[in-house]
């Protein structure tokens, strides 16, 4: 009897999860597209209204007719351009916020993996970073020693090991920490 109750609860929870994903999938991405389309339509429309208002005001000598064209074409066109600019700005902010949220999720996952590795290292499952001793190398005719992963010497074949206690070479300023000098 309990197995049928648990399976019914599982089915209800599964259905709830699927409905939640369906709602998110249906609404995701539609707002930013509408903002982009609104900005793409409103800005050129406003510019056209401004040009039409100016052209009609320029072809009449009567001031009261010019005022009508300036109000209907110029000010209305300017308002439409500003509204289109706000729509583009809202689109940009929406995309920026979505990217920031995705980066935050990715960063949280990476931190979780680092924490898991550190916890495993503390438990003795992996060797610690301190257990690996850094080795330094130098070129045959060089006067500076480098770490093996230094960008100056990476990929070179003519490297030789350097013993820090007996070397007279100076440390690389790029790859060697100041306390090693």
Image: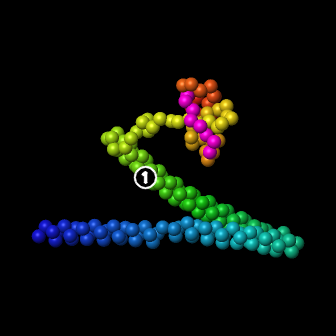
Density class for disc 1 (Cα within 10 Å; few <14, some 14-19, many ≥20) is few
Residue 82 lies in what quarter of the image?
bottom right
Residue at left 63%, top 42%?
158
Q: Is residue 155 left or right of residue 29?
A: right
Q: Which residues are magenta?
A: 157-164
**Is residue 160 shown above or below 39?**
above
Q: Position of residue 37 (x, y in %)?
A: 61, 71
Viewport quadrant of the C terminus:
top right
User: Camera-side residue: 3 or 119?
Assistant: 119
Residue 62 lies in what quarter of the image?
bottom right
Q: Which residue is mark 1?
A: 109
Residue 17 lies in what quarter of the image?
bottom left
Q: Position of residue 80 (x, y in %)?
A: 67, 67
Q: Is residue 162 magenta?
A: yes
Residue at left 57%, top 32%?
162
**Is residue 153 shown above or below 74?**
above
Viewport quadrant of the N terminus:
bottom left
Residue at left 49%, top 57%?
102
User: Camera-side residue: 2 or 94?
Assistant: 2
Which residue, as the protein is rendered here, is positioned at the far right? 61
Q: Position of residue 107 (x, y in %)?
A: 47, 50
Which residue, as the protein is rendered here, is positioned at the far left? 1
Residue at left 86%, top 71%?
58
Does any portion of residue 72 appear in the rendered image? no
Secondary structure beneath dot 1 equals helix
């Amino acid at each position: 009897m309990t197995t049928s109750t648990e399976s019914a609860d599982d089915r209800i929870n599964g259905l709830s999860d699927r409905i939640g994903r369906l709602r998110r999938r249906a609404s995701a991405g539609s707002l930013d597209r509408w903002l982009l389309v609104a900005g793409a339509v409103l800005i050129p429309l406003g510019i056209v209204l401004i040009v039409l208002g100016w052209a009609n005001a320029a072809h009449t000598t009567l001031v009261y007719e010019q005022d009508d064209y300036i109000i209907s074409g110029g000010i209305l066109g300017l308002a439409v351009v500003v509204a289109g600019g706000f729509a583009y700005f809202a689109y940009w902010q929406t995309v920026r916020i979505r990217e920031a949220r995705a980066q935050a999720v990715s960063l949280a996952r990476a931190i979780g993996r680092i924490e898991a590795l550190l916890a495993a290292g503390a438990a003795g499952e992996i060797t610690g970073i301190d257990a690996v001793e850094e080795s330094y190398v130098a070129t045959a005719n060089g006067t500076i020693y480098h770490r093996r992963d230094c960008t100056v010497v990476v990929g070179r074949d003519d490297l030789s090991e350097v013993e820090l206690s007996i070397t007279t070479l100076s440390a690389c300023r790029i790859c060697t920490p100041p306390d090693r000098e």
